[in-house]
């Protein structure tokens, strides 16, 4: 449920809202005024823009939500009927604020991203691939139009600006190439601005970041679009292909098998959905919402718990999963939230799991949760080693 927002001062532009529910939140650079408001139901972003653009952005965000893309979630469209539809404040798009998110400049080190660079490459490339798979032509790909949040050992990128978006049943290669070219141009400009703000000259700017994102994008797109040809004794490769895609986080929606060379061999092409495979599995099993890589880590912890309990039957695993949630995960999530409220509790749990693994590896023994958690707290709640943060494809 969402509030009705009727208590907000709609007679003023959002740039003039100073009191009441207005809160300061991390955000990127906007062409149009944006305000953030807090309710019991959560924090919401209200972006003000001319009515035609507001209608379009709201419609595009709804379409992207239906396609389960990593994008801002719209909850309403405000229309100031007394204003000229061309006026900047005539329309406003209301969306849920991306919780525990931050703009790209919070990741900047020096003239670029330093040790976070590989994470940025992966996050932005995955975002573009997911949007293009959903038929979304962005038209203004840039670091500023995205918010980021930690996702276990990786970073997740979420699109928050859909003013220039167009959604089609499917994108052509030419449309994808155009979006990539726009991204290269925009990212180069942003990295030049970053270097200038840090006191570096243009030679010190990370101007190749966009090219590197495009390389990651092309590698991942080729992996998803690859056609596999298998013989009658190689059907196991079909299962391996599906497992490979699931490992990357993509759910396989459809498989097309076409006989080739007289019918002895078949070509396999898959249609993949959004990158939510592990998130959906975790939600189905125990009802916990998490980002894709967070969900992967939590599912690994669930399997670890099942192994300790010796559960092998479907019924036993179902009971064990709920015990794991109520007796292991939820108490630790509450403790994490009480220790550091600003930290995403699920991300904190993943950081704890990583710390437990490092302890167990260094000591050559199974470290109990209570002991590992105390060690993690005493160490200052450390996260992942940056040297291990790139997710590859």
Image: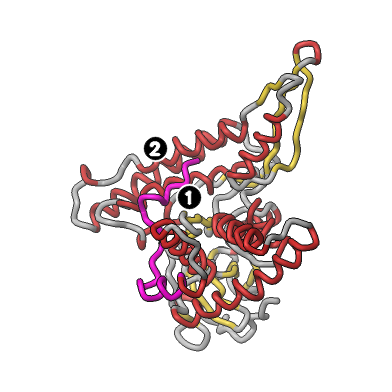
Q: Position of residue 168 (x, y in %)?
A: 67, 42
Front-most of residues 289 and 215: 289
Q: Position of residue 44 (x, y in %)?
A: 56, 74
- Is residue 70 found left or right of 144 in the rendered image? right
- The residue that label 1 is drawn on is 123
- Is residue 152 found left or right of 257 in the rendered image? left
Residues packed near mark 1 inside 10 Å, few (<14), some (14 to 19) or many (20 plus) = many
Residue drawn at point x = 32 percent, y = 57 percent: 108
Residue drawn at point x = 44 percent, y = 35 percent: 215
Q: Label 1, secondary structure: give it.
A: helix
Q: Position of residue 222 (x, y in %)?
A: 56, 31
The mark lying in front, picked from 2 and 1, is 1
Highlighted magenta segment, given as a residue range: 372-393
Front-most of residues 48 and 36: 36
- The residue that label 2 is drawn on is 211
Front-most of residues 27 and 81: 27
Give above or below for 182 relative to 98.
Answer: above
Indicate whether residue 373 is drawn in magenta. yes
Residue drawn at point x = 55 percent, y = 84 percent: 9
Residues packed near mark 2 inside 10 Å, few (<14), some (14 to 19) or many (20 plus) = some
Indicate whether residue 99 is drawn in magenta. no
Q: Nearer the N terminus, badge 2 or badge 1?
A: 1
Give above or below for 291 relative to 17.
Answer: above
Q: Position of residue 27 (x, y in %)?
A: 44, 66
Residue furthest out toward the top: 262
Residue 76 seen anywhere in this rendered image of the structure: no
Say which quarter of the image contains residue 2: bottom right
Q: Label 2, secondary structure: give it.
A: helix
């Amino acid at each position: 449920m969402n509030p009705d927002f009727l208590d907000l001062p709609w007679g003023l532009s959002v740039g003039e809202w100073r009191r009441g529910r207005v809160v300061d939140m991390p955000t990127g650079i906007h062409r149009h005024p944006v305000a953030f408001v807090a309710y019991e139901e959560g924090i919401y972003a209200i972006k003000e823009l001319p009515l035609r653009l507001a209608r379009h952005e709201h419609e595009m965000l709804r379409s992207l939500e239906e396609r389960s893309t990593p994008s801002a979630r719209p909850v309403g469209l405000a229309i100031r009927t007394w204003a000229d539809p061309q006026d900047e404040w005539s329309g406003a798009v209301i969306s849920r604020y991306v919780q525990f998110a931050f703009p790209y400049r919070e990741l900047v080190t020096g003239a670029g991203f330093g040790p976070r660079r590989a994470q940025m490459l992966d996050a932005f490339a995955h975002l573009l691939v997911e949007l293009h798979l959903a038929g979304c032509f962005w038209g203004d790909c840039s670091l500023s139009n995205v918010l980021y949040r930690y996702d276990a050992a990786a970073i997740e990128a979420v699109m928050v600006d859909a003013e220039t978006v167009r959604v089609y049943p499917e994108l052509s290669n030419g449309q994808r190439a155009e979006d990539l070219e726009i991204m290269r141009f925009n990212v180069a400009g942003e990295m030049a601005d970053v270097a200038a703000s840090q006191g570096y000259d243009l030679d010190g700017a990370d101007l190749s970041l966009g090219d590197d994102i495009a390389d990651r994008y092309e590698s991942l797109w080729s992996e998803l679009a690859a056609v596999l040809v298998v013989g009658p004794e190689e059907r196991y490769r079909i299962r391996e292909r599906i497992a490979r895609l699931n490992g990357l986080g993509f759910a396989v929606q459809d498989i097309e098998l076409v006989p080739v060379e007289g019918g002895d061999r078949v070509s396999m092409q898959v249609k993949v959905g959004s990158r939510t495979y592990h998130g959906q599995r975790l939600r189905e099993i125990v009802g916990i919402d998490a980002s894709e890589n967070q969900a992967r880590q939590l599912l690994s912890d669930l399997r670890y718990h099942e192994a300790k309990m010796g559960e092998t039957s479907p019924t036993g695993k179902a009971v064990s999963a709920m015990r794991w949630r109520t007796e292991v995960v939820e108490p630790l999530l509450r403790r994490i939230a009480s220790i550091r409220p600003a930290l995403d509790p699920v991300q904190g749990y993943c950081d704890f799991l990583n710390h437990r693994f490092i302890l167990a590896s260094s000591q050559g023994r199974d470290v109990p949760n209570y002991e590992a958690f105390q060690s993690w707290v005493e160490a200052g709640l450390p996260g992942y080693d940056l040297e291990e943060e790139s997710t590859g494809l």
